[in-house]
Image (cartoon, grey):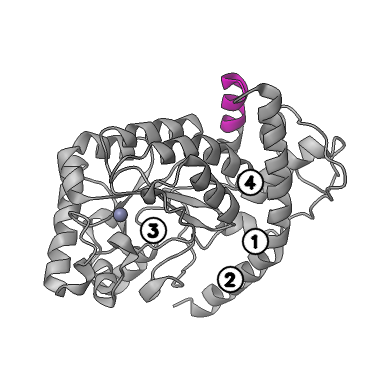
Amino acid sequence: MKIGPTTRTIAIVTVIVSAIMGSSHLIGNSSQQEHEQGRAAAGGYDSDAARGKRHRGAVDDGLGLSASPSGRARAKQSAASKPPPKPDTPAPPSAAAPGGPGPAHQGVPALPPLPAVFNQRVVVGPGKPPLMPDKAGPFGSRMTTGTLQVALTFDDGPDPKYTPEVLALLDEYQVKATFCVVGEMAAQFPELVREIVDEGHTLCNHTWNHDVALGTKSKAVIRADMQRTNDAIHRAVPDAKISYFRHPGGAWTQAAVDVAKELGMSSLHWAVDPQDWTKPGAPAIEKVVNTDTALGSIVLMHDAGGEREGTVTALKTILPDLEKRFALAALPPGIDEPKRHGIELPVHAGQK
Ligand SMILES: [Zn+2]
């Protein structure tokens, strides 16, 4: 069942991703610098018009190279720091033209073109190819997207105050994310679940009432909790695809992972955790996310579960900063491992 080619592809991608990590840091540093300079010069955000143009260019450039994070980053870097781009460095016009070149950087070497393999498997999101497998998290849960894309995830909602604020910021920056919703919150605020889905974000089951000990209970109890949560989501959005499960508190157990799989959900851990639920303040949240996020990171944040002013404020910096360095994507519904599980298990209603 394609084990050979799949394994080979994973190996190739792993090697390539590892190989360019250093380059990504290079991009990140120069982009951060460029970003800081840009903000200082503009006295705040870019103009709405310039930002809108930039985002449309980044989002609507279709499949392939221009959609890859490094391609975009390199194009922007090239536009900013290398006025005469090298002919062998493809710079999509849609990404390079708007925004305007920032201050020139000295001594930042041009990056080599990316291998073609990046353009084939790195585009994720609804209707896109499956994610590479990743079982590096606790009990085989997923820690990364397995691609070059970065996925932002928001837990514990929906919340009547903060979820709309997060959604508005995601919309402003044209970023799609994944929301790990709590069943009783979904039951209480179904219109917010609908809004999440309508705006192109994807869903993850985060248990009925955020029971951190759920995984220690019997499989029957775990299954009933997860099913009740999915049912609440489906009452809000009948055809919602719920392809992920995240255990509260990261308190994974084998039983929780197994039952999630039975229900067609991949277990979703994370790679970057700013501990925003402890309310460390926006600067601390920004620092962790902007520093720790790397290619393929799944980033954990919270749009609910308490006062989330810090997270919302931090997003105003995090979104433009990460967007300069990475492609941000919602985790794809229905075409991740659950579909493969469907070979051996009944396909869950939410994953077709
Ligand atoms: Zn949580």
Question: Which residue matches tag 2?
Answer: 9
Q: Quadrant of ligand 1?
A: bottom left
Q: Which mark is residue 325?
A: 4
**Rendered view: 194 above or below 69:** above
Going by the numbered disc 3, the residue's amino acid type is Ile
Q: Is residue 55 magenta?
A: yes
Q: Are marks 2 and 1 in contact (CB under 8 Å)?
A: yes
Residue at mark 2: C-beta within 8 A of ligand 1: no
Please identify, in this view, whether the residue under mark 1 or under mark 4 is nearer the observer.
4
Mark 1 to mark 4: distance in Å? 19 Å
Mark 1 to mark 3: distance in Å? 20 Å
Q: Which mark is residue 335?
A: 3
Which residue: 38% across, 66% down? 337
Question: Which residue matches tag 1?
Answer: 117
Q: Secondary structure at mark 1?
A: helix
Going by the numbered disc 1, the residue's amino acid type is Val
Which residue: 53% across, 50% down? 289
Residue 86 position within the rendered picture, expressed as x and y whole percent measured from the top left: 86, 44
Going by the numbered disc 2, the residue's amino acid type is Thr
| Upstream in sequence: badge 1 or badge 3 | 1
Q: Residues within 10 Å of mark 3 (few under 14, many from 20)?
A: many
| Upstream in sequence: badge 4 or badge 3 | 4
